[in-house]
Structure formats: C-alpha cells, structure tokens
Image (spheres, rainbow, N blue to C red):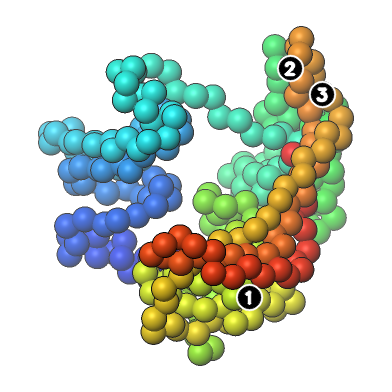
Amino acid sequence: GGYTPAERRAVERKFFGGELDGVVATCALELGVDVGDLDATVHLGYPGSRAALLQQAGRAGRDPCRPSLAVVVLFDSPLDQYLARSGASLINGPVEACALSVSNEKVLRDQLLCAAAEAPLCLESDRSLFVGQRDGVVADAEAGAAFDDAVAGLERCEALKRVSGGTLAARADRAKHSRDVPLRVVDPVNIEVKLNGVVIDTIPYARAFYELYEGAVYLHQARPHLVTKFDLQTNEALVTRMTRCDYHTSSRNHTDVDPVRVLESRGPLKTGVVHVSSKVWGYRKVCKRTFKVLESKTFSLPPLEFET
C-alpha cells in the first residue's frame, strides 16, 4: 500500500515545486505527469514494451536545452536477460501497437461520452472510428453491437442528447466526464483501507481480493498492518497496525480460462472470446527469515469473472 490520492497530489506538488530532488514511484508516474526540468529516470526492470519504456523515460528531457539520462536496471527475468545479452536496442525502432477490445461496452461508454463532450457525435461518420477496422473491413459484428448498445445506454440515461442535424452531444453537466475516467485502472469500484476509522489507502476491487483478505499482512508505506475485516458490502477493509511481524502472507488462488467462441483462425492460431474466472480461496503465512510455511488457511470469497 502507498498513499491516498490527496497524499499523492501533495508529493507531486512538492516534486514539481522543487522541494524534492527525486521521487520513487510506480510506473503510474508515466501517466498525466509533466515535469519540465526532470534530469534523469532510473527504471527497475524492463516494463515489457518499448512503448512503456519510452513513455516512462520521457518524464525527463522535456527541456531541449538540457541533456537527460535514462538508466534501465535489468533483472533476471528471461526477457530482461535476453535484452542484456543480445544487445538489442531498448529505444530505437517502432513502438508496439496498442491493443484494445473495441467490443468492451464499458470502455466504449466512457470514451463516447468523452468524445461527445469535445464535439457532437455523428453516428454515421464516427461509427468506424469506435468500432474499428481491419484491412478496411469492420472487425466483427460484436463490436458494432457493443457500439449500438453503448450509444443506446447513454441516451437512455440522458448523458447524450440529440441536437441539430441528428448528432449526439454530451449533457452540460457531463462536459468534464474525462476527469472521472481513470487512466490507471478500468475497475470502477475501489476498496477503502481503514485504520481506526480513517482511510489510509484505496485499492482497486479486483486487486483487493489478493491483498486484503482477512488475515493478510498489508504493507502501507513499509509498515505492516493486519487485515481484520474485508467487507464487500461496504467496500472497505479494516486493518490494525502491527508492532512486529516476522512473516508475510501469500494468497492462494486459481484461474480458469474457458473459450466462448472463435473470432478468427490462422492455421493453428485462433483469436476469440474467453470467459475468465479467478478465485482466491486461501493464504499462507511464510516466515521472512527461513521462508518456511508457518500456517495455511482457507476462506470463501466470490469469484472474479469477466469475458475478454
């Protein structure tokens, strides 16, 4: 665990204002942060794509009159070691294509509303921009159906309204909807972590199943806390501070991936829709010093399910 949103903004203000010479951050620093006079970045491990590395390293060097430095510390993972041994370029060459499911209605609803807030939507001409194309042909009927359902849903709740020429515009009070669409997570629900009734952190719903189950040792700013209650009705986890802790906890879980339908086949390779079901069903207490399993416990949490 780290900081509440208010605490993060305070750290960013001090960083931008020059009170802090440096900051240790997750890769989320690559989103929405513009530090014009940052001199250097240090990256712990290859982030998995050239696009992500360039985005993170781009936090420094915004001033064209000053040199900047990006240091990548490669770890022992197969990909990191391949890059270290092969001498492959980390920054030269094309960046990877962005992959997005255009049939994800939740994503479409938010993006359509953001677009309509900037300029009214013309369904005939704008449809292909949101449904997506492959070789000049609409990708699949499912994406088109998701687009139609998203538009219909936004009209039903009156977030979009018809204006002159049959176009759709965002309602006046939804004009700043983009501020409510997070770039870091898609999960719309957060779990509040509370210590003595005070919120000390917020965790995305799906991640909380792996970190905030009852009995888990939750680290907040490097201090151990014991989770005493995980309530999915109130979306909160209650914790108590631990003065001493010689073990850590590790969740036990399994994930089932079942094909739903095939969208495209190219020889032995297939792309399609799958149903994913993940269930966290227990945890282990592991000694920090010897790595010996001290205790195993089971519990029952609802499965996390989605189609992708």
Q: Picture coordinates of residue 106 (x, y %)?
A: 72, 48
Residue at position x 74%, y 77% from top?
A: 233
The C terminus sits in image quarter: top right
Relative to 233, is 284 on the left or the right?
left
Asked whether residue 168 is in view, the answer is no
Is 265 situated left or right of 192 in this image?
right
Q: Residues within 10 Å of mark 2 (few under 14, many from 20)?
A: few
Please tell me which of labels 1 and 2 falls first in the chain: 1
Would you place residue 190 above or below residue 45 in this image?
below
- Residue 270: mark in rendering: none
Q: Amino acid at mark 3?
A: Leu
CA gap between label 1 and label 2 equals 42 Å
As measured in the structure, the alpha-carbon distance from the residue carrying label 2 to the one carrying label 3 is: 11 Å
The label shown at residue 214 is 1
Judging by the rendered image, the residue that carries numbered circle 2 is 269
**Image position, residue 56 (x, y; %):** 35, 40
**In which quadrant will I find the N terminus?**
bottom left
Closest to the camera, between mark 1 and mark 3, is 1
Task: Look at the numbered disc 3 and give the secondary structure of its residue.
Answer: strand
Res 63 visible: yes
Residue to which mark 3 is pinned: 263
Of mark 1 and mark 3, the one earlier in the sequence is: 1
2 vs 3, front mark: 2
Q: Nearer the viewer, residue 58 or 295?
A: 295
Give percent across and percent down for residue 265.
Answer: 79, 15
Where on the picture, by quarter, is residue 273? top right
Quarter assignment of residue 141: top right
Relative vertical location of residue 174 with respect to residue 132 in this rendering, above or below? below
Foreground: 120 or 126?
126
